[in-house]
Image: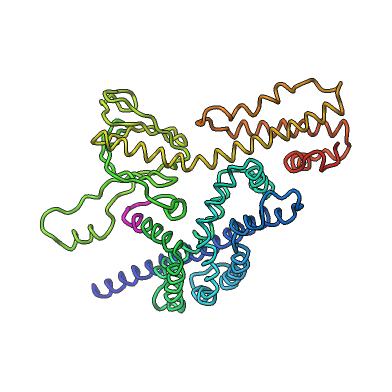
Amino acid sequence: MDEDDGHHENGVHATKDSDRQQRLRLCVLNELLNTERDYVRTLLFLQSAFLHRIRQTADDQQCLSTEHVKILFSNIEDILELHKEVLSAVESSLQPDPHPQHALGHVFLQFRESFSVYGEYCSNHEKALRLLVELNKIPNIRTFLLHCMLLGGKKSTDVPLEGYLLSPIQRICKYPLLLKELLKRTPKKHTDYPAVEEALQAMKAVCSNINETKRQMEKLEALEQLQSHIEGWEGTNLTDICTELLLHGNLLKISAGNIQERVFFLFDNLLVYCKRKSRVSGKKSAKRTKSINGPLYVFRGRINTEVMEVENVEDGTADYHSNNYTVTNGWKIHNTAKNKWFVCMAKHAEDKQKWLDAILREREQRECLKLGMERDAYVMIAEKGEKLYHLMMTKSRHLIKDRRRKLSIVPKCFMGKASFVVTRRLLCLVHVLQVYFAGLFLSLCVPLTSSPTFLLALSLSFPPEECGLH
């Protein structure tokens, strides 16, 4: 009877493990499908917002040469055509909806030779970034590129053009990681197992044959390995939002009246802190070996650096945030998304300086392009407002009060200190005022339409002379 109970219990455990494995495999299949769709949308955006618009611009108004366009975008349209086919094949294989029994490995084997198209794009990428840095120094080109992005439907400047141009390299490097996870979640008896195993090796070979992707792959694999050593990880995977580890080390963390030693990891876009996992003391044992080979840390928290504020703390300070403990070699971190504070302390002044320097570099790298694009957006909108003002003063001189002085000082808001960040709230206010004045003028002078969508597109997209308003 006891033996029968044991068999029954083992069977229950095996069924639970099998169900869990199927759920995890389904998650990987869904991720492959959804991220492929997102990637194709990104490539379509680059094609329609930039390449098509550049081709539609008259020769005498072109600010980018054919050579510049070729360097910037390389063979991205070839990549787009390839991934339209890849997406179609993935969707066909997972019809009508993804299911754990579906097979997907054959899709990557089908296209493995075609992925060589990435070689040209990846080898050209660094040259494209260097050129973009130089082009961004030319105001009219910088404004034109921003104009393309806004008209392409991206009403936010959080991701600059550099980020979109990096997408192909990130995607080709992501395939081995996704296939590795799919293989891990595929039972050996599954019909898809041999194809997934072969596809994984094929995609690794594709990446290793391209120098740029090889470097990117090494970084992503390092991030994946680091995350595997953190038990209880919460939130988005490191490889989805970060590209490299900038600094890590032990710090004392003061929060909620407790002083605890934590291991901090600073990535681009993310700060993570963990508790070092205790190990078994004494003689070596199977348990101790498992602890060493398994997780080394226990996840305790993460902060997106976009919402993180850092404040230096003078030695000897004892205040509310440090719970009246005396701080040495410390600084405060404020998670503005949750309105939570904690204090970090390093062992030595040199360590503190390393952390503050790394945090500053990460912030400068992330903010400089974004701030530049927000400034450009503000300039462009202010210039459009000036044109509308002149137009209204010409057509309706006696109907509109003279606000020239107020309009003329708008650009000075962002031309001051380098640390000034144009807030989205102020940017939205300018949009609202711009649409309002455009609507007022059109309702008085040119009875075209009162549609807000038309007015916004008109005010952002076309100077008055192109609309026949002169």
The quadrant where residue 15 appears = bottom left
* Residue 283 vertical position relative to residue 261 in the rendered view, above or below: below
Quick one: 151 or 136, which is closer to the camera? 136
Q: Position of residue 3 (x, y in %)?
A: 24, 75
* Residue 245 vertical position relative to residue 330 in the rendered view, above or below: below
Residue 10 painted magenta: no
Position of residue 303 in the picture relative to residue 253 (left or right):
right
Quarter of the image that includes the N terminus: bottom left
Quick one: 374 or 270, which is closer to the camera? 374
Residue found 68% across the figure and 31% down from its top: 430
Position of residue 28 in the picture relative to residue 143 (left or right):
left
* Residue 221 vertical position relative to residue 307 in the rendered view, above or below: below
Residue found 38% across the figure and 32% down from its top: 341
Q: In the image, which residues are magenta?
A: 225-233
Q: Is residue 81 visible?
A: yes
Q: Position of residue 239 (x, y in %)?
A: 43, 55
Residue 230 painted magenta: yes
Quarter of the image that includes the C terminus: top right
Q: Position of residue 294 (x, y in %)?
A: 27, 59
Q: Is residue 103 visible?
A: no
